[in-house]
Amino acid sequence: MTSYLPIGDFSRATHMTVKTLRHYHEIGLLEPADVDPRTGYRRYSVEQIPTAQVVRRFRDLGMPLEEIRTILTASDVATRNRHISAHLRRLEEELGRTQRAVAALHDLLTPPASGDVPAIELRSVGAVTAAAITATVEARDVETWFQGALGELFATVAGQGLRETGPAGGVYADELFTLHRGAATVFVPCDGPVRPLGRVEPLHVPPAELAVIEHCGPPSEVDRAYGALATYVSRHALAVDGPLREYYLVGRRQTPDSALWRTEVCWPVFHTSGPDQRPHAGSDTECATPPC
């Protein structure tokens, strides 16, 4: 014989509010076992308690309602477990981002040790021929746009039988930082002019004098490198107008572990003293950049 609980008792048994239970009924996620057609009173069977507890735990873990519905209606255990595992992976990735953010905050709040100065060099880079993609993008979309554009560039250069002559780079207009919307260009140096194809166009990357710092880690943490570089330039160099540059020495193409990515951040400057004449990593001779 099935035992029924009124919605108030079922609420106490499952630690779900009556309002939540009503909402789940309305969207078809957790329907009561019986609804009085005259009064509209909801009754739940005791057999529904474990299901309600599963729903509550999934919600505590931030799982979307539609995904919970998919799990509850899965036709087999393998399908159900696949959806649960996918959500657990997302939680692990989010936990990793949170841990990195906490570590970064600790570093920001910890006074730097005496003599602990980031390695910054002044560098002259020559002009290069490159394949490039340029667009006006929102700052929040830069990473997604960048990865897509970079993959397209590598494929186009290889497909046209050209040889890469240095690491990929990016050129970013001031508006992308000041207004969070502006022109962005990502390029791959190559040994000949690329034929226009889709979004890909040939580009002459002009020479520049730059103050350069290397960032080790994911793009979400590159602001620290920008801050250190701006501090250095304000004290020891003469900044000039012009877009900021980045060079991507190690990225997703080399390793999926973003903690191992290496990006050179470059600020345009006017050299007032003898610049570092070592060749840039984008030239045919490898640059002796200090390791992370």
Image (cartoon, grey):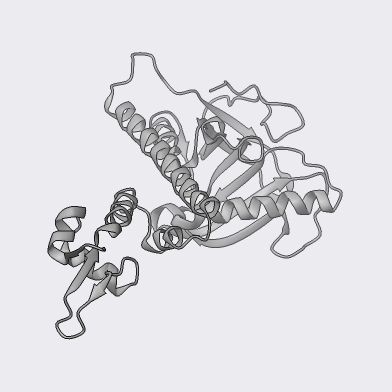
Question: Image point 52% across, 37% down: which residue?
Answer: 265
- Position of residue 247 measured from the top left corner of the image (x, y, whole percent): 60, 39
Residue ranking furthest to the top: 114
Judging depth in this view, the residue of 94 and 58 nearest the camera is 58
Instruction: Name, please, the residue furthest toward the front.
Output: 1
Residue at coordinates 29% horizontally, 58% vertically from top-left?
47
Closer-to-camera residue (88/237) = 88
Q: Give the left or right position of residue 263, taking residue 26 as reference.
A: right
The quadrant the N terminus occupies is bottom left
The image position of residue 255, as x and y in percent, is: 62, 35
Rendered position, 113 above or below 120: above
Q: Which residue corresponds to the image point at 34% horizontal and 71% vertical from the top-left?
A: 28
Measuring from the top left, give residue 288's x and y in whole percent.
64, 21
Residue 120, relative to residue 36: is it above or below? above
Left or right: 226 in relation to 265: left
Task: Find residue 291 and report its horizontal and vertical position in percent.
Answer: 57, 21
